[in-house]
């Protein structure tokens, strides 16, 4: 369509040229009638081109195809109008004027190859209409007017026109194929550029993640390691304080181990080395094991720790599921200063569900999605100085791989609840989700770690019920 404006200007000039050439030889009413009709068709094409530029050019491919179906007939009509010019000059004007008119038609036909070959159907319909109309006029003149008594060169003209018609169709096809290959090459180049840009951005993002990791690691590991050094020096100078210092050394060592456990979990997730062992688990047994591990931590902080279990089973990976729920309980204990923590298993129409309630500091709405990013720590939260900000990131990744949708509701200052829906884990689908999550990280595209959307505020019950 971008080439059609030049074609219209050329068409108007050629109409004037045909008028000037045939004016002395052809009856004026017929010549003027053809010129008016051809000019009117040209005006319609010009209006269609303006419509295209105004409404269709910015639109999508469906609108372009609909435009071609609606207005595509205009081009063969234009070709037919030029073919009808043969009625004015063939065997009616002098041979010199006929030669000029045939030259005009051949030039229009060759010009159509350049301007229309990008859309093969339009080019062919234009050439076919022009050539078929001209041949029809020539056959009618030779057979009905002259009763096949005209000069012999008429037959050579018919043969030449038919050969020229087929040569133009083949030339247009070759040019169409060349243009299509050029478009495909351009499209592939754009794809390559987009892919390189995406991979470059992924590399920059990886560098940024590494920088954040190093900064966080340097800050978070320094504290327990520095404390270990101080306790060791103190113990060396005053060995009689071993009973006072030993518990502190143990706590510092646990803090370092916890940090490294989180880092190792993240490394396994990002490298795709997660191995799934799906089996049938008893919910009450799972919660009993978790209670044995985390009740002492809660009671050491003066928190109430309640467990509500039900009989039932679920298909999942026992180690990974225990890691997910354990991280949720650990977070609940860490960010709760008074009140308590409730771990409950429930059976719902959608399936079994594990809930972890706390009466802690809660999470403001602006942070409720960000907490599932790696290395993210909620500003001003007590307890964020002794971790990497990886706990909930690992929870969300593992829950996504296992196919257990994770919901969260929280009220700042009132507490938080996490609900883990224990849909049966399919090993094949889980392995595919693990692989797709690695591809997402590798190519830098944002990853949706949670199945359903995160549920906020209004779905949370008053946190005081947890402590009660």
Image (tube, helix red, strand yellow):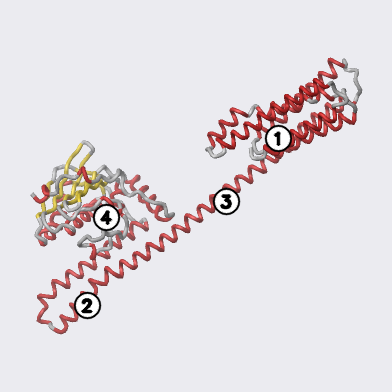
- 96 vs 50, left or right, is right
**Nearer the viewer's eye, disc 1 or disc 2?**
1
* Residue displayed at 20% across by 42% down: 352
Residue tagged by mark 2?
229
Q: Is residue 190 visible?
A: yes
Q: Quadrant of the N terminus?
A: top right
Q: CA distance from mark 2 to mark 3?
A: 58 Å
Mark 4 vs mark 2: which is more N-terminal? 2
432 w.r.t. 68: above or below: below
Residue tagged by mark 1?
8
Q: Residues within 10 Å of mark 4 (few under 14, many from 20)?
A: many
* Residue displayed at 11% across by 47% down: 465
Mark 2 vs mark 3: which is more N-terminal? 3
User: Badges 4 and 3: C-beta atoms under 8 Å apart?
Assistant: no
Mark 4 vs mark 3: which is more N-terminal? 3
Q: Residues within 10 Å of mark 3 (few under 14, many from 20)?
A: few
Residue tagged by mark 4?
392
Q: CA distance from mark 4 to mark 2?
A: 30 Å
Circle 4 SS class: helix
List x then y, in percent, for residue 341: 14, 53
User: As rendered, which of 360 and 180 lies closer to the eye?
Assistant: 360
User: As rendered, which of 153 and 425 lies closer to the eye?
Assistant: 153
Q: CA distance from mark 1 to mark 3?
A: 33 Å
- 151 vs 391, left or right, is right
User: Badges 4 and 1: C-beta atoms under 8 Å apart?
Assistant: no
Q: Which mark is residue 234?
A: none
Residue tagged by mark 3?
189
């Amino acid at each position: 369509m971008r080439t059609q404006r030049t074609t219209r200007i050329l068409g108007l000039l050629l109409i004037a040229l045909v008028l000037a050439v045939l004016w002395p030889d052809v009856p004026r009413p017929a010549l003027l009638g053809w010129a008016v009709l051809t000019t009117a068709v040209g005006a319609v094409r010009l209006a269609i081109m303006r419509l295209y530029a105004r409404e269709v050019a910015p639109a999508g491919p469906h609108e372009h195809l609909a435009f071609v179906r609606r207005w595509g007939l205009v081009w063969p009509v234009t070709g037919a109008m030029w073919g009808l010019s043969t009625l004015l000059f063939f065997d009616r004007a002098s041979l010199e004027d006929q030669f000029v008119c045939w030259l005009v038609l051949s030039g229009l036909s060759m010009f159509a190859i350049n301007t229309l070959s990008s859309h093969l159907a339009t080019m062919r319909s234009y050439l076919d209409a022009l050539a078929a109309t001209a041949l029809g006029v020539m056959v009618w003149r030779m057979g009905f007017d002259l009763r096949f008594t005209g000069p012999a060169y008429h037959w050579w003209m018919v043969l030449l026109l038919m050969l020229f018609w087929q040569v133009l169709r083949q030339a247009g096809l070759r040019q169409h194929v060349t243009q299509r290959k050029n478009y495909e090459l351009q499209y592939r180049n754009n794809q390559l550029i987009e892919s390189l840009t995406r991979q470059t951005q992924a590399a920059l993002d990886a560098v940024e993640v590494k920088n954040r990791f190093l900064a966080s690691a340097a800050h978070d590991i320094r504290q327990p390691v520095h404390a270990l050094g101080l306790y060791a020096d103190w113990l060396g100078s005053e060995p009689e304080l071993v009973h006072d210092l030993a518990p502190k050394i143990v706590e510092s060592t646990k803090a370092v181990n916890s940090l490294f456990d989180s880092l190792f979990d993240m490394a396994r997730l990002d490298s795709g080395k997660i191995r799934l062992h799906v089996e049938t688990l008893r919910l009450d047994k799972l919660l009993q094991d978790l209670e044995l591990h985390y009740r002492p931590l809660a009671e050491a902080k003066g928190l109430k720790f309640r467990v509500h279990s039900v009989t039932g089973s679920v298909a999942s990976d026992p180690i990974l599921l225990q890691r997910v729920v354990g991280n949720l309980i650990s977070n609940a204990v860490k960010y709760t200063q008074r009140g308590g923590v409730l771990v409950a298993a429930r059976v719902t129409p959608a399936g079994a569900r594990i809930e972890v309630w706390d009466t802690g500091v809660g999470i403001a709405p602006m942070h409720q999605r960000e907490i599932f990013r790696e290395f993210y720590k909620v500003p001003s939260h007590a307890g964020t100085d002794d971790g990497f900000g990886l706990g909930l990131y690992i929870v969300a990744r593992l829950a996504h791989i296992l196919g257990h949708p994770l919901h969260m509701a929280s009220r700042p200052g009132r507490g938080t609840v996490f609900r883990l829906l224990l849909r049966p884990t399919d090993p094949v689908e889980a392995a595919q989700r693990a692989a797709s999550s690695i591809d997402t990280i590798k190519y830098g595209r944002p990853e949706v770690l949670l199945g359903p959307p995160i549920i906020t505020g209004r779905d949370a019950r008053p946190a005081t019920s947890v402590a009660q």
